[in-house]
Amino acid sequence: MGFFIFLIIIGIALSAIQKQRQSSSWQSVARHTGLAVNSGSFFSAPTMSGTVRGVQVRAEVITRGAGESQHRVTRYTVMYPRSSPSITFRRQSVLSFFREFVGGREAVTGDPRFDDSVVVDGPDSHALREYLTPARRAAILAIFSAWPRAEVTPSSIVVETRRIERNHDRMMATLNRLIDSGRLLAAPQRVDEALAPLDDGDMATAVQALHEVNEADEEPNVVTQLIEAESLVALG
């Protein structure tokens, strides 16, 4: 009986240590980003929300599953002004075939890399094709490359990690990439202009123009920088 009580005490102590580590990390992230944080309590989950670089952000711990499969994850949501009809983008998967029977389909943009990787839930329309500019396609592909289970719409990105996030650097990296993805999806014009030479097969000019966009940006966008790096690799 005494040993059982000892194990319970150890369990409570370890849980308290993990809770403290999580609270410390979230408070640190909040200080760096300007987000408001609610550290929660022993019985409630933490949340963090606010606006960063013009994008609304929320991070929270939620419970998934039930019974023995129940687990807690960190969910990140970024929101930005809607600029297209109501549609949802998801990564292509082995189950994508069945989505045809519930309104889903492969994207059709003429860009094989995008069309073969992304499923669109929503009506096919001229507005949809206008929305999927080269910059937005690149941003969406970058999101799915990092988070295959992400859900993207013209007004939000939702990502869940398979853990309660307690690491400051990892959380900052996730938030920065999601925030900059939202910024690019909301306002892709400058990057689209830089990528315009690709229509004529002029990769070198496009890479140089994209580099100039990144150099001139007062708030560097990590996603745009990633697109530039990938373009340099493609250029050889």
Image (cartoon, rainbow, N blue to C red):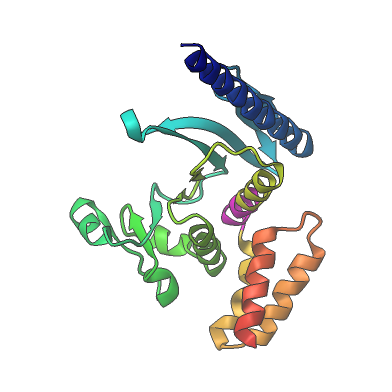
Residue 41 drawn at (x, y percent): 60, 17
Q: Compared to 72, does 124 lie above or below?
A: below
Residue 117 drawn at (x, y percent): 39, 67
Indicate left or right for 59 with 225 as reference. Answer: left
**Magenta-colored stretch includes residue 25:** no
Residue drawn 24% across the image and 53% down it = 103
Q: Compared to 94, does 47 lie above or below?
A: above
Question: Residue 111 appears in which quarter of the rendering?
Answer: bottom left
Q: Is residue 19 visible in this depiction of the protein? A: yes
Of the 4 image quadrants, the one containing the C terminus is bottom right
Residue drawn 74% across the image and 73% down it = 211
Residue drawn 62% across the image and 55% down it = 187
Residue drawn 54% across the image and 40% down it = 77
Indicate left or right for 45 with 229 as reference. Answer: left
- Count of marks placed on residues: 0
Residue 57 drawn at (x, y percent): 61, 38
**Looking at the image, which is closer to me, 107 or 149?**
149
**Magenta-colored stretch includes residue 186:** yes
Q: Is residue 190 visible in this depiction of the protein? A: no
Indicate left or right for 198 with 132 as reference. Answer: right
Residue pushed farthest top? 1
Indicate left or right for 183 with 99 as reference. Answer: right
Residue pushed farthest front? 2
Magenta span: 179-187
Residue 202 drawn at (x, y percent): 62, 88
Q: Compared to 216, does 79 lie above or below?
A: above
Question: Residue 36 appears in which quarter of the rendering?
Answer: top right
User: What type of secondary structure mainly makes up the magenta span?
Assistant: helix
